[in-house]
Image (cartoon, grey):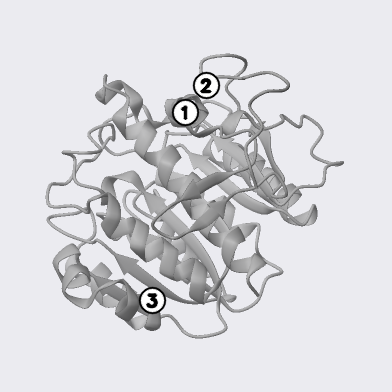
């Protein structure tokens, strides 16, 4: 399929309104059809150190315009494949409404957005925001059975409760594991000192977690890791940008040295898309003000674009 650059608008990345990938914006969540629905969740009141992830959705959208192929998809010469052709219908739902100081209702609004995407038959992709936004994302899948969560992150995020806080960015995997329809978690990239105590690691393993550090992941390889995920599971993927080394992703509130590089994660996601049914995605903790180069937001956008390409290429091959 050839790109047709000789007709219509050239539509360069810096032209126009920066929706995700410069895809159509849909304001009415009750009446849309799409293969992929992008939802911004600009909530960062769950952070324990540096805030700023509330600006993540805006920064990732802006960065994603670099990858707004627009014409006939993107050709990858290594894979000899065209990813995200025009037949893959991606829309941008805008942002869930965030109510400052009100975690409960902000999360409720995020859940409503993800629920609308599911109802429309679209793959929901949520851009945070801090990692607490994963909590309403998983709740939206209450009617989905046999969910397995693939978490790519520097931190375990398995704190139960601390000083009454149960819905912050240190709690989402604990809250997910408590859901009856979540049958297990694969937690990759976990390293260094984190907010979760030893007891949290013990609880996580008792509740079905497979915990793999960066060094262990590199020793195992992507194929072996993805094979550890049960066959037939409905896979939800949550990506915290601090899973990456801060040398390539400094724009985050809780950076942790020794993280993944680009192809470490890309190969995991490609193998996950090839081997499992992906039901939802979130990417969180991009805090653009800590990275004036913009490379963290570009990395986030590129990871999402590539992952979506892998998912729909795998589906088209079935």
Q: Specify whether 195 is left or right of 38.
A: left
Position in image of residue 136 (x %, y %): 57, 51
The residue lying at 57 percent from left, 22 percent from top is 18
N-terminal of the two: label 3 or label 1? 1
Note whether 155 is above or below 23 in the view shown.
below
The residue lying at 43 percent from left, 31 percent from top is 56
Note whether 139 is above or below 233 in the view shown.
above
N-terminal of the two: label 3 or label 2? 2
| Disc nearest the viewer among 3 and 1 | 1
Q: Which residue is mark 1?
A: 66
Find the distance from the CA under tag 3 to the CA under tag 1.
30 Å
Question: Which image quarter: residue 181?
Answer: bottom right
Note whether 291 is above or below 277 in the view shown.
above
Q: Which residue is mark 2?
A: 13
Question: Which image quarter: residue 161?
Answer: bottom left
The residue lying at 58 percent from left, 58 percent from top is 280
The residue lying at 22 percent from left, 77 percent from top is 220
Residue 181 visible here: yes
Mark 2 element type = loop
């Amino acid at each position: 399929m050839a790109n047709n650059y000789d007709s219509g608008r050239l539509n360069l990345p810096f032209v126009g309104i920066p929706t995700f990938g410069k895809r159509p914006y849909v304001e009415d969540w009750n009446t849309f059809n799409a293969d992929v629905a992008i939802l911004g969740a600009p909530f960062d009141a769950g952070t324990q150190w540096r805030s700023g992830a509330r600006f993540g959705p805006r920064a990732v959208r802006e960065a994603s315009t670099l990858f707004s192929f627009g014409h006939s998809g993107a050709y990858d010469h290594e894979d000899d494949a065209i990813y995200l052709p025009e037949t893959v219908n991606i829309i941008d739902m805008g942002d869930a409404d965030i109510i400052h100081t009100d975690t409960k209702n902000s999360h409720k609004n995020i859940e409503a957005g993800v629920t609308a995407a599911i109802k429309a038959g679209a793959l929901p992709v949520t851009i945070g925001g801090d990692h607490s936004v994963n909590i309403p994302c998983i709740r939206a899948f209450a009617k989905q059975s046999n969910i397995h969560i693939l978490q790519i992150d520097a931190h375990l995020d398995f704190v139960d409760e601390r000083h009454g806080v149960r819905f912050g960015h240190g709690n989402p995997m604990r809250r997910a594991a408590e859901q009856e329809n979540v049958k297990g978690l694969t937690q990759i990239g976990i390293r260094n000192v984190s907010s979760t105590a030893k007891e949290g690691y013990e609880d996580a393993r008792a509740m079905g977690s497979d915990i793999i550090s960066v060094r262990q992941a590199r020793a195992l390889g992507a194929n072996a890791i993805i094979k550890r995920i049960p066959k037939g599971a409905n896979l939800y993927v949550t990506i915290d940008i601090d899973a990456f080394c801060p040398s390539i992703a400094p724009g985050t509130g809780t950076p942790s040295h020794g993280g993944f590089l680009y192809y470490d994660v890309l190969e995991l996601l490609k193998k996950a898309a090839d081997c499992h049914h992906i039901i939802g995605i979130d990417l969180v903790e991009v805090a653009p003000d800590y990275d004036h180069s913009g490379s963290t937001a570009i990395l986030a956008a590129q990871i999402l674009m590539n992952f979506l390409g892998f998912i729909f290429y795998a589906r088209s091959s079935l």
